[in-house]
């Protein structure tokens, strides 16, 4: 048995001074956010390449150590092996820290653009109250400032630079 489609809900007239915003939608649709995602992918690829290169060198050292294992005192072998293990862990930690710092730097740029855009749109639309659109059951589209915020963000910031 097929259920008939649900008719679209019609909500009442817009309420003056009340505005709705989907922060996630506004940010995700912005050029700045798209630029940040592209830059983070490049950064991740670059760091992965760097990790692979350094890890290969450390793996060679570990292999050389394993080959000489029977000619080295067990305690010295364990010490050298532990040093190599710590170097790998330190390298992974350092590269992860660099990625997180780049991500935070880029996200700060996007957040600053969002705050500026939101401030301009709120002033222009005379919003006395802004609610998160995604937590409401429904709304009158005339109260939704999401696309205006995205457009304003695009005017403020189109590309994100990360270290």
Image: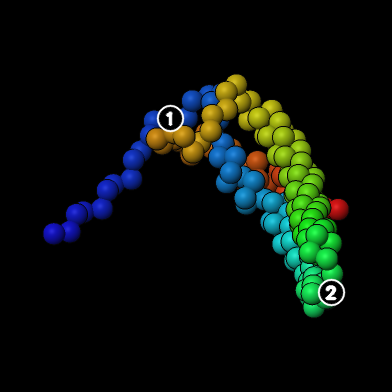
Mark 1 vs 2: CB contact within 8 A: no
What's the colour scheme?
Answer: rainbow
Mark 1 or 2, closer to the camera: 2
Q: Residue at x 13, y 59 (%)?
A: 1
**Residue 129 found in image quarter:** top right
For label 1, the SS is loop
Q: Residues within 10 Å of mark 2 (few under 14, many from 20)?
A: few
Q: Exactly how many numbered labels are in the figure?
A: 2
User: Residue at point 54% right, 26% down?
Assistant: 18
Q: Is residue 48 above or below residue 109?
A: below
Name the mark on residue 71: 2
**Can see residue 43?**
no
Q: Is residue 146 above or below residue 64?
A: above
Q: Residue at label 1?
A: 13
Q: CA distance from mark 1 to mark 2?
A: 85 Å
Please, which residue is most extreme toward the left here?
Answer: 1
Mark 1: few/some/many CA within 10 Å (<14, 14-19, 20+): few
Q: Nearer the viewer, residue 150 or 23?
A: 23
Residue at (60, 40) in percent of width and height: 23
Residue 120: x %, y % from top left: 72, 33
x and y, in percent, of residue 144 in the image: 54, 37
133 relative position to 56: left or right? left
Say whether residue 102 is left or right of residue 6: right
């Amino acid at each position: 048995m097929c259920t008939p489609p649900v008719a679209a809900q019609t909500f009442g007239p817009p309420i003056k001074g009340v505005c709705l915003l989907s922060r996630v939608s506004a940010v995700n649709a912005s050029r700045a956010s798209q630029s940040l995602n592209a830059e983070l992918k490049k950064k991740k690829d670059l760091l992965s390449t760097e990790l692979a290169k350094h890890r290969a060198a450390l793996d060679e050292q570990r292999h050389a150590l394993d080959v000489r294992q029977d000619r080295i005192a067990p305690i010295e072998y364990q010490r050298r092996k532990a040093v190599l293990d710590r170097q790998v862990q330190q390298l992974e930690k350092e590269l992860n820290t660099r990625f997180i710092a780049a991500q935070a730097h880029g996200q700060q740029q996007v957040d600053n653009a969002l705050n500026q855009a939101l401030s301009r749109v709120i002033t222009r639309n005379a919003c006395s109250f802004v609610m998160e659109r995604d937590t409401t059951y429904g709304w009158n589209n005339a109260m939704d400032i999401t696309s205006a915020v995205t457009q304003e963000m695009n005017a403020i910031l189109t590309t994100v630079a990360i270290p």
